[in-house]
Amino acid sequence: MQEKNKNILTGDKDFGDRLRTLRKEKGLSQTALAQKLGYKKGASISNIEKGKTPINTQVLAKIAHLLGIDLHFLITGNPSPGISEVLKELMPYIYDNQIKTLLKIGQLVRKREELQANGQDAARLRKVEGELEKLHRFSTSFFDTVSKIQKKYGV
């Protein structure tokens, strides 16, 4: 049976490169990550990234949590099979929603331009601009979320 604190990943260059990349993407220095993990020096992270220092499973789990990534991805560089399969199934629906949202934004922009050109019905213009603003906020948030999901799970 595997020990709870078994040291793993010594000498795994791919893991070290992945950890370095993910750490930098989160804007964390080696020292900052070391402090969050309870190490005294940033050199500890440097040695882990270089594959010189083994890392135990508890620290791996904490790193994954701190970086906001899937533990399986942190260790292997591949998304968790279950999650990625579900997301692959959902992506066509997500893309369809993105297209519909962009088309609706286009319609509202044309309607706004038409109302502005006519110079009439200020109330309708405000209503269209309000709808456009709400849809823009929603779509920006939605697209950002989809992008994060794609990046996090490699879909």
Image: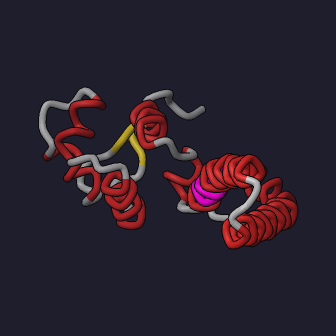
Left or right: residue 90 versus residue 22 is right
The answer to whether one can see residue 117 in this image is yes
Q: Position of residue 38 (x, y in %)?
A: 25, 26
Q: Position of residue 77 (x, y in %)?
A: 53, 61
Magenta range is 142-149
Which residue occupies 63% across, 63% down?
A: 154
- Residue 6 included in the magenta stretch of the image: no
Which residue occupies 28% across, 30% down?
A: 36
- Residue 146 included in the magenta stretch of the image: yes
Quadrant of residue 116 within the rendered picture = bottom right
Left or right: residue 43 versus residue 86 is left
Magenta: main secondary structure equals: helix
Which residue occupies 41% across, 61% down?
A: 18
Which residue occupies 78% across, 56% down?
A: 87
Quadrant of residue 88 within the rendered picture = bottom right
Q: Nearer the viewer, residue 14 or 98?
A: 98
Q: Position of residue 117 (x, y in %)?
A: 68, 73
Query: The C terminus lies in which quarter of the figure?
Result: bottom right
